[in-house]
Image (cartoon, helix red, strand yellow):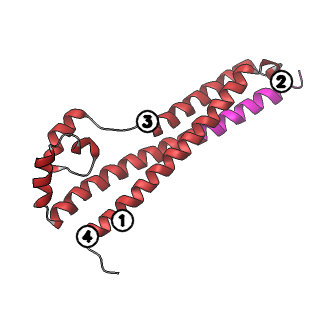
Amino acid sequence: MDSSPAEFAWRVHTALESWTAKVDMKASIMLAFQGGVLIFVSTSPPALVGARPGAVAGAMVLLLTAMGFAATAILPALGAVRRHRRECGQHWIYFGHLRLWQPVALESRLAVLTERDEVRALSTQLIRMSRLNWRKHRLLQGSVLLTLLAMLVMLVAVTAGWGR
């Protein structure tokens, strides 16, 4: 399969978009689950009778931290406005840059766009998207691990209180 460097870069861009959407969906699901657990624990004191209060508090702190990680993962990362203004003349893929262009100026720039220009712009975009995706996946990973740890601590807090 012969394809130009630009075609290949666009395929990678599409894959990165897919990975971004998937990690955002997973983080959203985690945040909803964590919110449900938080509400359950907060509104179910009878279920926690005899539970170790320090352990329950620790589990809640872990859960809230996990929620912070999940929320940060799905928070839109738009970038700095100053940076967009500084870079917009050389970038025409990301909407944060495109919004600063005038239609006639963008039309003129795109009319003289070479494949090398396209590949250069895509290369920059692919690197930025990859860094963002890496961060999102690491945040999701931390959120999942902290949620599991919070649930384990809660289980220990409740079961340790049963023999009292």
Residue 159 vertical position relative to residue 18 in the rendered view, above or below: above
For the residues carrying marks 2 and 1, which lies nearer the camera in this image? 1
Residue at screen point 30% across, 64% down: 9
SS class of the residue under badge 3?
loop
Please identify the quarter of the rendering in which residue 83 is found: top left
Label located before the other in sequence (1 or 3): 1
Q: Are marks 4 and 1 in contact (CB under 8 Å)?
A: no
Q: Is residue 157 magenta?
A: yes
Q: Which residues are magenta?
A: 145-164
Amino acid carrying mark 3 in the image: Leu
Tag 2 near tag 4, CB within 8 Å: no
Which quadrant holds the C terminus? top right
Residue 163 drawn at (x, y percent): 89, 25
The residue that appears at 23% across and 41% down in the rendered structure is 99
Q: CA distance from mark 4 to mark 3?
A: 32 Å
Which of the numbered marks, if any, corresponds to residue 161?
2
Residue drawn 31% across and 49% down?
128
Q: CA distance from mark 2 to mark 3?
A: 38 Å
Q: Position of residue 3 (x, y in %)?
A: 29, 76
Question: What is the C-alpha distance between the residues marked 2 and 1?
Answer: 55 Å
Relative to 52, is 16 on the left or the right?
left
The answer to whether residue 92 is magenta is no
How far is mark 4 from mark 1, CA to CA?
Answer: 10 Å
Q: Position of residue 111 (x, y in %)?
A: 12, 60
- Mark 2 and mark 4: span between their CA atoms? 63 Å
The residue to which callout 1 is attached is 11
Labels 2 & 1 near each other (Cβ < 8 A):
no
Q: Nearer the viewer, mark 2 or mark 3?
A: 3
Q: Name the residue that disc number 4 marks.
A: 5
Sequence-wise first label, 4 or 3: 4
**Residue 75, label in figure:** 3
